[in-house]
Image (cartoon, rainbow, N blue to C red):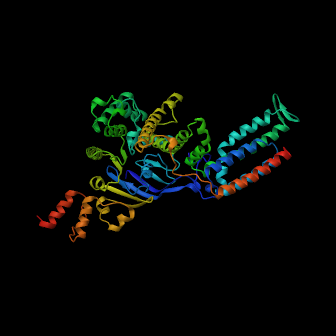
């Protein structure tokens, strides 16, 4: 297991003003796979993932990330080791751009983690190619780019350090359909390179299409941790309770079911839905 | 960051919360002004009693005010040291070189501490029980007469409330950018002073870019909704004195009269 939360508790603030956000969280995110974190706004998703690179430390319990153990006692200077292994793409990561050129911005992380100038440049170029930023804008100011390009440059800035684990907090929010598709493709490619991906998302179609494993948070507790097929075949009122939707193909099948056309297991993708309908209409081929 | 009590608004339902912000500003002003006029313990006891009444009426725990005083403890100690060692007069209790401790020095130091604590606590009550935007509106109303001499009070108040509105946003933004750059290996705690100073750039540039962008967005949002002139505007929250304000005025009047008599009698 790449990432293991063991009875993690966390509150913002102290004493009387303390607001518990994570309550006794135990969950795993398997190595080399894509784990989706879902749940309503305020369920603790962002707080949870900020434990993966030690931006937040648990009040009690521990988080094991590969061979790094994070507890309330972990010292600030040890966290650099952890952060070199974990890339963190925040919501709207384009807000973190600062350097004079695209290339310099992307090379910022590698330099911080101790790479020489040459090596950092090479890593930055490789990352820019990975996210599909054409070479002729590498020397431009990052603030002169379009929104979608800025997003990709920011993501390159995280990937340039070649982290084993990549955490992304709603990476496609605000992108156009093409941008979204490109980014989801990139995530699959990263998985293909053997990286462990943790993805916060509100779009269940993405969960169904991409994720190998899903952790559902509800009011700071783990409501479910299972594969997408199991997750989207729960009784209907459960989704209402934790505040998530079914992916559209599954919802379509559910609507058919309620109209008197039971299809068996709810499908996760349009393809699976189509083949189930085919089977129902034409029988086995 | 969330330990600071001075200057922070904390929602509550105490009696003080129901007062008009103008009342609170005026009472705080009068109180602070009154304290300047005395150097005797009797009026101070009376002023302390008044403060305790006010604190009780906020219905906030006393521990909160205590934690609010802690950050300025060093300032108080510093002032006390200055007062004790550098006040001339007699009798001299102790001296070493140019340092000497005199009886008036010690007495002064005690009064300075009391005055300091009372003023800080009273102002804390004002900011703790009044949302910043209400303070801005109240200032606009109180400074209203200055409009006659062409002081752009309404614009100033608007600027003040916009600035106040941006404070939590910018704090939030700072935290986010800091997290993002920390994740990319930024460290404030290693390297020499130049390296550390340089580490601030990746924080400041995005912060300024974001703040400017927000300011432009806000200006646009105001313009498309027809904003032209702050003077002609009415307010969403209309300030109105209620019966609590008259009660507060009465209590304060009693305080001031007794305080004045005590000052006249004891000095």
Query: Relative to residue A112, is residue A171 drawn left or right?
Result: left
Residue sitting nearer the eye, A232 or A35: A232
Residue sitting nearer the eye, B220 or B67: B220
Q: Residue furthest right?
A: B91
Q: Looking at the figure, which quarter contains the C terminus of chain B? A: top right
Query: Relative to residue B151, is residue A69 drawn left or right?
Result: left
Which quarter of the figure has residue A100?
top left
Query: Relative to residue B45, is residue A143 drawn left or right?
Result: left
| Residue drawn at point x = 37 percent, y = 57 percent | A215
Residue B152: x %, y % from top left: 55, 37
Residue sitting nearer the eye, B141 or B41: B141
Residue A20: x %, y % from top left: 51, 57
Residue sitting nearer the eye, A123 or B33: B33
Q: Looking at the figure, which quarter contains the N terminus of chain B? A: top right
Vertical position of residue B240 compared to residue B78: above or below:
below
Q: Residue furthest front?
A: B148
Q: Is residue B240 visible?
A: yes
Which quarter of the figure has residue B220?
top left
Query: Relative to residue A253, is residue B119 drawn left or right?
Result: right
Residue A43: x %, y % from top left: 43, 57
| Residue drawn at point x = 15 percent, y = 65 percent | A279
Q: Is residue B162 visible?
A: no
Which quarter of the figure has residue B150?
top right
Residue A160: x %, y % from top left: 35, 37
Q: Residue furthest bottom?
A: A260
How many discs mark residues in the rendered view?
0
């Amino acid at each position: 297991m790449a990432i293991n939360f063991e009875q993690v508790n966390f509150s913002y603030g102290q004493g009387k003003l303390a607001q518990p956000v994570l309550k006794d969280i135990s969950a795993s995110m398997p190595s080399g796979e894509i784990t989706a974190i879902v749940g309503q706004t305020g369920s603790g998703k962002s707080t949870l993932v900020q434990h993966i690179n030690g931006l937040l430390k648990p009040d009690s319990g521990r988080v094991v990330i590969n061979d790094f153990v994070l507890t309330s006692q972990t010292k600030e200077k040890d966290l650099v080791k952890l952060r070199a292994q974990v890339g963190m793409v925040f919501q709207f990561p384009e807000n973190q751009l600062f350097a004079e050129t695209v290339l310099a911005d992307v090379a910022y992380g590698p330099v911080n983690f101790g790479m020489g100038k040459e090596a950092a440049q090479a890593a930055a170029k490789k990352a820019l190619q990975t996210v599909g930023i054409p070479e002729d804008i590498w020397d431009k100011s990052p603030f002169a780019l379009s929104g979608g390009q800025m997003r990709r440059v920011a993501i390159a800035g995280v990937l340039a350090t070649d982290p084993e684990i990549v955490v992304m907090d709603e990476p496609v929010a605000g992108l156009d359909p093409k941008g979204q598709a490109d980014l989801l493709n990139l995530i699959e490619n990263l998985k293909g390179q053997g990286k462990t991906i943790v993805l916060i998302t509100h779009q269940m179609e993405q969960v169904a299409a991409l994720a190998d494993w899903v952790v559902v948070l509800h009011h700071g507790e783990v409501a479910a941790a299972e594969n997408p097929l199991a997750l989207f075949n729960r009784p209907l009122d459960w989704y209402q309770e934790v505040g998530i939707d079914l992916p559209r193909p599954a919802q379509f099948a559910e609507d058919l079911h309620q109209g008197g056309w039971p299809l068996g297991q709810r499908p996760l993708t349009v393809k699976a839905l189509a083949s189930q309908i085919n089977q129902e209409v034409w029988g086995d081929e | 960051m969330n330990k600071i009590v001075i200057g922070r608004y904390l929602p509550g339902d105490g009696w003080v919360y129901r007062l008009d912000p103008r009342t609170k500003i005026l009472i705080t002003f009068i109180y602070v002004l009154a304290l300047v006029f005395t150097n005797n313990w009797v009026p101070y006891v009376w002023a302390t009693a008044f403060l305790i009444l006010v604190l009780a009426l906020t219905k906030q725990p006393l521990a909160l005010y205590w934690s609010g005083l802690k950050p300025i403890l060093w300032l108080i100690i510093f002032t006390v040291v200055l007062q004790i060692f550098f006040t001339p007069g007699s009798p001299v209790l102790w001296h070493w070189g140019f340092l000497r401790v005199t009886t008036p020095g010690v007495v002064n130091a005690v009064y300075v501490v009391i005055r300091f604590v009372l003023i800080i606590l009273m102002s804390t009550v004002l900011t703790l029980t009044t949302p910043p935007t209400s303070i801005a509106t109240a200032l606009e109303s109180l400074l209203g007469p200055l409009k006659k001499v062409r002081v752009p009070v309404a614009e100033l108040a608007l600027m003040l409330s916009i600035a106040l509105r941006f404070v939590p946003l910018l704090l939030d933004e700072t935290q986010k950018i800091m997290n993002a750059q920390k994740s990319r290996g930024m460290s404030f705690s290693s390297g020499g002073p130049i390296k550390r100073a340089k580490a601030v750039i990746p924080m400041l540039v995005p912060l300024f870019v974001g703040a400017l962008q927000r300011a432009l967005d806000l200006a646009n949002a105001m313009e498309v909704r027809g904003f032209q002139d702050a003077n002609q505007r009415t307010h969403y929250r209309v300030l109105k004195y209620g019966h609590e304000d008259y009660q507060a005025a009465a209590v304060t009047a009693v305080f001031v009269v007794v305080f004045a008599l005590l000052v006249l009698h004891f000095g």
